Amino acid sequence: MKEKDHVKEVFSKNKEAYVSSSTHSTGSDLPLMIEWLKPKSTMIALDIATGGGHVAKQLSRHIGKVIATDLTEEMLENTSRHLTSINNISYKVADAENLPFDDHSFDIVTCRIAAHHFPNPDLFVQEVARVLKQDGKFLFIDNIAPDDHALDRFNNTLEKMRDYSHVRSRTILEWKSIFADFGLSIEKEKNRKKTLPYQEWIKRTLDSKNDMNRVEKFILEASDEIKEYFQVRMEDGCIISFAIDEWMVLGQK
């Protein structure tokens, strides 16, 4: 599928940037994730689309075993080298929409800042529900689109311009409907504004000056309402940062 080929291309090229990215490697959601999940040493967890391995690393301190998966082999190999000293994480190339694991295999499944790259979110959530044990927990974090159509369109257009492997940031209502379809009840949820340092954000996926200028122009020409919603911050005529919506949710089978 074309979308998944795009994901492999982008993440192979930028594998190191996702390990060092401040957006991915830090954040209050990482310790909060442990507080919500209450992992135990007897448990086994699956981290889907592990990227730079930040969730797997966090979980590994509290749980018996973590299997970290990613669609992109080069990304997974790079992450495993960074985490080579952690002996309870194993790595497997896997498609989030077609997981190579038996039914009812995991106490915990996690997926953080990745699902906006998935073409078929229903297949992804169906697979999560399949591999979770009964009463197992699913910790999901992703960028989300606002309910307002104009803001949604701006958000997804911007992300696609900056990263052609982006498929869609979905709304909370869309995700809740999919969770319900596959028997995942929502135990806790939290949505927040996530501030993105502009230069780090744009350089993580783009290296062409023309492409960067096109993205900058798109933001600068947006309406005042859009700039206010996304908290675009300027300094000396340059974009310093902006903010997007992020949803963190704990589901249970």
Image (cartoon, helix red, strand yellow):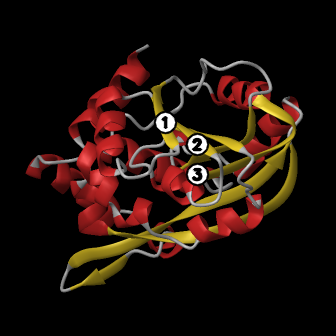
Q: Provide the residue designation for mark 3.
A: 142
Reading the chain from its start, which is encountered first: label 1 or label 2?
2
Position of residue 152 in the picture relative to residue 252 (left or right): left
Q: How many marks?
A: 3
Name the residue nearer the viewer: 51 or 162. Answer: 51
Q: Residues within 10 Å of mark 2 (few under 14, many from 20)?
A: many
Horizontal and vertical percent position of residue 222: 39, 63
Residue drawn where x is 11% and y is 46% of the image:
208
Q: Residues under labels 3 and 2: Cα distance?
A: 20 Å
Horizontal and vertical percent position of residue 149: 62, 50
For marks 3 and 2, give the one nearer the viewer.
2
Quarter placement of the C terminus: top right
Q: Is residue 107 above or below residue 59?
A: above
Name the residue nearer the viewer: 53 or 15. Answer: 53
Residue drawn where x is 32% and y is 54% of the image:
19
Q: Which mark is residue 90?
A: 1
Name the residue nearer the viewer: 119 or 58. Answer: 58
Q: Provide the residue designation for mark 2.
A: 66
| Residue type for callout 3 | Asp
Horizontal and vertical percent position of residue 70: 45, 32
Q: Residues within 10 Å of mark 3 (few under 14, many from 20)?
A: many
Reading the chain from its start, which is encountered first: label 3 or label 2?
2
Q: Which mark is residue 137?
A: none
Q: Quadrant of residue 197?
A: bottom left
Q: Residues under labels 1 and 3: Cα distance?
A: 23 Å
Reading the chain from its start, which is encountered first: label 1 or label 3?
1
Position of residue 208 in the picture relative to residue 125 (left or right): left
Horizontal and vertical percent position of residue 152: 57, 51
Q: Residues under labels 1 and 2: Cα distance?
A: 6 Å
Would you say residue 164 is visible in this rendering?
A: no
For marks 1 and 3, give the one nearer the viewer.
1
Quarter placement of the N terminus: top left
